[in-house]
Amino acid sequence: MISIAQILKPEHIHLSLKGENQRDAVQEVLFSLRGDVRVPAWEDLRTSVIERNAPAVAAGGCGVVIAHGRTNAVNALVMGAGRLSEGFHSNDIPEKVRFVFVAGIPTAFNNEYLRVVGSIARLCSRPELLKELIATTTPRSFLEILASAELKL
């Protein structure tokens, strides 16, 4: 099984996203994946993710977007994440969106990506975990919090 820590790298975690709407925040996280060796066709990944227009979901008192695309633009599972200090409003939920996750999934992966995306969704439904993710100050600690919580699922 592939873990979150295997696909999400600290250099792809941004703790001060500037996006004022979902599209901008997703693009900001996507941009961090540009140049990753797992993403040989970044523009195709970007198109795949943006076309899906993932809804925001309420989770633990704030909103979370888990945008993803299944595409041949990636040669392995890849993920980026971001946190917004103020958040933005979404028509999908009453809470402000504070977290954005973006995943690129090779088309050959059938079930593994569902497990990873499902893990992120379950983790983000825990208010205490979201408080830790809001309070953390470094990308590495953000990842460590997620990885540690994933082990307890």
Image (tube, helix red, strand yellow):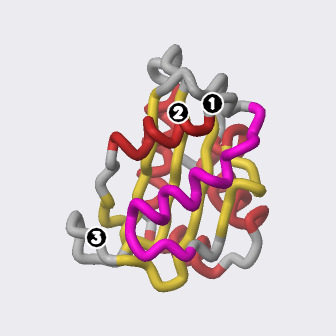
Crowding at dot 2, Cα within 10 Å, few <14 / some 14-19 / many 20+, comes out as some
- Image coordinates of residue 134 in percent, x first then y, are 58, 77
| Residue 111 picture location, percent across and down | 46, 22
The residue sitting at 77% across, 56% down in the picture is 11
The residue depicted at 58 percent of the width and 64 percent of the height is 82
**Crowding near pointer 1: few (<14 within 10 Å), some, many (20+)?**
some
Q: CA distance from mark 3 to mark 2?
A: 25 Å
Of 2 and 20, the residue lying toward us: 20
Tell me which segment is drawn in magenta.
18-37
Give above or below for 68 relative to 112.
below
- For the residue pair 33 and 13, the one nearer the viewer reads as 33
**Image quadrant in which the N terminus is located:** top right
In space, the residues marked 1 and 3 are separated at their CA atoms by 29 Å
Q: Gap in Å between the C-alphas at discs 1 and 2?
A: 5 Å
Q: Percent x, y for residue 61?
A: 36, 76
What numbered label is drawn on residue 44? 2
Is residue 29 shown in magenta? yes
Which secondary structure, mark 1? loop
Give yes or no for contact between labels 1 and 2 (Cβ–Cβ under 8 Å): yes
Residue behind mark 1: 41
Disc 1 marks which amino acid? Answer: Ala
The disc, 3 or 2, on the residue closer to the chain's N-terminal end is: 2
Disc number for residue 90: 3
**Circle 3: is it few (<14), some (14-19), or many (20+) Cα within 10 Å?**
some
Q: What amino acid is labelled 2 in the image?
A: Asp
The amino acid marked with disc number 3 is: Ser
Callout 3: helix, strand or loop? loop
